[in-house]
Image: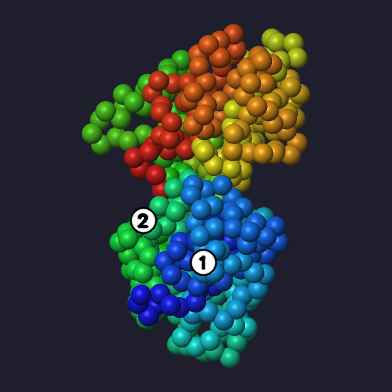
Amino acid sequence: MTLIERQAVCVVGLGYIGLPTAAVLASCGYKVHGVETDVRAREIINSGRAHIIEHDLDMLVRAGIESGRLAAFAEPVTADVFVLCVPTPLGPDRGADLTHVRAATESICPVLKKGDLVILESTSPPGTTKMIAELVFANTDLEPGDLYFVHAPERVLPGRILHEVVQNDRIIGGLDEESTQKGRAFFETFVRGELILCDSRMAEMAKLVENASRDVQIAFANELSMLCEDLDIDVRELIEIANRHPRVNILEPGPGVGGHCIAVDPWFIVDMAKGKARLLETARAVNDSKPRWVADKVKNATAALIDPVIACFGATYKADIDDLRESPALKIIQDLQASGVGRVLVVDPNLDELPGCQLVAPEVAYLEADVFVFLVPHAPFFLITSEQRSKKIVIDVCGVTSSRTRPGTTSGWSERADGPIA
Ligand SMILES: NC(=O)c1ccc[n+]([C@@H]2O[C@H](COP(=O)([O-])OP(=O)(O)OC[C@H]3O[C@@H](n4cnc5c(N)ncnc54)[C@H](O)[C@@H]3O)[C@@H](O)[C@H]2O)c1
């Protein structure tokens, strides 16, 4: 074990990014002090389980807790490395809401000491790492040069987080060269991918640009799907044919764009660009318009039915996860419920409950529904037979009934298995 592996790490925010990161670090021999404001999450983690669904995470958390290398607390303690993994949602003006980043930074101020490394993993607009440093210096006796600050954005794909935390190439952007090198020394102890060194502003902007790029590409596919409907052209066949061009790679359409990354981060650029990010703004508008378009399609298809029962398959923002944040599928479900178009059932194998919705087993949907609306390509939905779908009106916006789509090749909104970043 190298010297750095014996260091203590404090991971602040044990959610979809922080908990897998903390568990991986514990498995690599670090003593990890997790900090989490959510009492229930802390209790579940300390009982040796994950409070979120992520492949193999339960096992790794249990191993961390049992080995004594991982535990969750309400407050930070002295450590050598601090990793901030708190949310960065959209603010009311569609800029980044850095409230959690500020609160997390202030919470570590009392325990910071000279020589510590502070890593911001939360997706943040350019200048946030510098803001953190200034906040620390304003709230402690420490001075510039005493600490190291790095932005290391996450690029993991939910469902593959444990694999990708280790295997992905990682951007390490230091506030200064010493910070970058300190960050490199830390990440190279557990990351197998290449470490890409740059400054913190470049790292911050790179993450936003990656997600904005995805958003624009998905908007293209979603726009195609809507105009192909009017032209009576099968969009999936069209995309498959067009993608035979050696330099064309159109993504798959879906119900819209969800999650708290691709649906959120492009706004941070739009906010900063002051009218100059026209393409990004349009892509957001196209993707945000898709749920309403899907809901209207369902309403039109059921207009002639009396008291139809509509089974919506999938509510999460992408396939095979339990995350509902910014979910376009959920927006469609809520739109259908609010419109009173019929009784709306929801089938989602990844959810135990869905407040405000009638969550049912697939068998209930087979028995009671007149309409099947496929919104999220969860793996089990590919097993629904044509016999089970027979005599139903089928609206499939995620490709589960298409012979052109295979399980795991889409992510619920639009993503090919051969090129995901999220
Ligand atoms: N989830 C992803 O796939 C993903 C991918 C790339 C980047 N990111 C980015 O990573 C960051 C974290 O995302 P996430 O998905 O893990 O969010 P999350 O909501 O799942 O987890 C954040 C956790 O931080 C906790 N928290 C909030 N404020 C805190 C504080 N002051 N102290 C301690 N705990 C606090 C919350 O209770 C929550 O459990 C965001 O900026 C996000 O954009 C997420």
Q: Viewer-proximal residue, 237 or 50?
A: 50
Q: In percent of the image, x 44 and y 48: which residue is there?
A: 160
75 w.r.t. 365: above or below: below
Which dot marks residue 67? 1
Query: Few, some or many C-alpha atoms within 10 Å of disc 1 (few <14, some 14-19, many ≥20)?
Result: some
Left or right, 103 with reference to 287: right
- Three-letter code for the amino acid on which mark 1 is drawn: Ser
What is the CA distance from the residue labelled 2 to the residue labelled 1? 26 Å
Asked whether the viewer can see residue 221, the reply is no
In the rendered image, which residue does mark 2 sit on?
168
- The kind of secondary structure element at disc 2 is loop
Snapshot quadrant of residue 246: top left
Snapshot quadrant of residue 323: top right
105 w.r.t. 60: above or below: below
Outermost residue, front side: 66
Q: Viewer-proximal residue, 63 or 28?
A: 63
- Three-letter code for the amino acid on which mark 2 is drawn: Asn
Query: Few, some or many C-alpha atoms within 10 Å of disc 2 (few <14, some 14-19, many ≥20)?
Result: some
Numbered disc in front, either 2 or 1: 1
Q: In percent of the image, x 54 and y 36: which residue is there?
A: 256
